[in-house]
Image (spheres, rainbow, N blue to C red):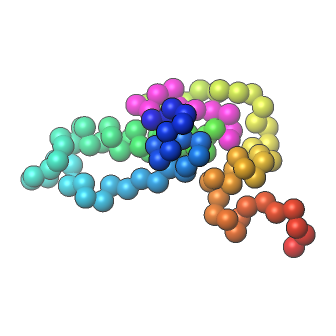
Amino acid sequence: MRSKGRPGLGDDRWPLVTHFVGCKPCGEHGASYEAARCRRGMERALNFADDQILKLYGFQHESLNTTAVWRVRNDTGRPMDADDEEIGRLLHPSFRASSKPL
């Protein structure tokens, strides 16, 4: 899921968009998956989404299977000073940095 060069899988070029539409409620009658498997899948998807933000602060999940995070770099004292290209994938276009005065 974290590999480079695979557009649409949440890599550097595409922001993560996920939804659980169509999932039958975990553990209900006719459920697609058992409740534990369903929960693990949802947690992995949400941890992957978290990594997109945590990356700006120099952190990443140890594994998509856990909420534990670890520092991947130590140069993030001011994460909001990231350049527009890096942070732009996470912001709506109207919130992106502009060189034009307001």
Q: Which residues are magenta?
A: 56-65
Residue 46 place in picture, x, y as percent: 44, 45
Name the residue at 45% across, 35% down. Answer: 1
Residue furthest out toward the bottom: 102
Q: Position of residue 75 (x, y in %)?
A: 78, 31
Residue drawn at x 63%, y 38% is 55
Relative depth, front residue between 41 and 99:
99
Relative image position of residue 91 (x, y in whole percent)? 65, 58
Q: Is residue 63 magenta?
A: yes
Q: Is residue 81 left or right of residue 43?
A: right
Tell me residue 27's x, y (percent): 16, 47
Q: Total marks drawn?
A: 0
Can you say which quadrant of the picture contains the C terminus? Answer: bottom right
- The reply to whether residue 29 is visible in this rendering is yes
Q: Residue at x 70, y 69 (%)?
A: 94
Q: Is residue 68 visible?
A: no
Q: Is residue 35 above or below residue 15?
A: above
- Residue lying farthest to the right in this orientation: 101
From the viewer's side, name the closer residue of 23 and 2: 2
> From the viewer's perspective, is 48 left or right of 36?
right
Q: Would you identify the image quadrant in which residue 66 lies?
A: top left
Residue found at the very far left of the displayed protein: 29
Q: Residue at x 70, y 46 (%)?
A: 86
Q: Is residue 95 on the magenta stretch? A: no
Query: Which of the 4 image quadrants contains residue 76?
Result: top right
